[in-house]
Image (cartoon, rainbow, N blue to C red):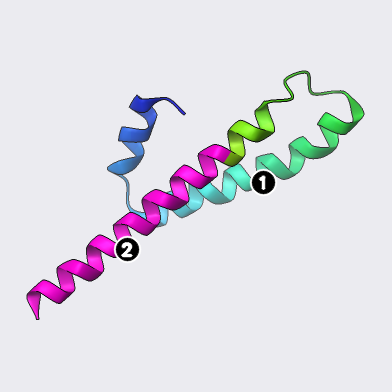
Amino acid sequence: MKKKEYNELKSKEITDLLKIVKAKKAELAKLGPKAISGEEKNLKKAGNIRKEVAQILTLIREKEIAKAEEKNENI
């Protein structure tokens, strides 16, 4: 994932990010059999998708922590 794409994801809501994660995981599930059968030429693609999923999940967690801290400050 490029830095520009990562910065665009930062501005999205948690629900949108969860939808993206779900789509990426579905893509990863389809990619597995293709890589084994030899249809997929780019073998690094699966690793890149896993990395993107991890980055998006990290963003989601950061947003959750920020919301919790914001609530604690208001109390």
Question: Which residue does the numbered mark 2 point to in the structure image?
Answer: 64
**Tag 2 and tag 1, C-beta contact below 8 Å:** no
Residue at the image point whose x is 16% and y is 75% from the top:
72
Q: Secondary structure at mark 1?
A: helix
Question: Which residue does the numbered mark 1 point to in the structure image?
Answer: 26
Residue at the image point whose x is 27% and y is 43% from the top:
11
Label 2 packing within 10 angstroms: few (<14), some (14-19), many (20+): few
Dominant secondary structure, magenta: helix
Label 1 packing within 10 angstroms: few (<14), some (14-19), many (20+): few
Amino acid at the residue labelled 2: Glu
Rendered image quadrant of residue 63:
bottom left
Left-right relation of 12 to 17:
left
Residue 64 at x, y percent in the picture: 32, 63
Q: Secondary structure at mark 2?
A: helix
Q: Quadrant of the C terminus?
A: bottom left
Q: Is residue 68 magenta?
A: yes
Amino acid at the residue labelled 1: Ala
Rendered image quadrant of residue 46:
top right
Residue at the image point whose x is 47% and y is 54% from the top:
18
Residue at the image point whose x is 39% and y is 55% from the top:
60
The correct choice, above or below, for 64 with respect to 52 in the image is below
The correct choice, above or below, for 60 with respect to 27 in the image is below
The residues colored magenta run 51-75
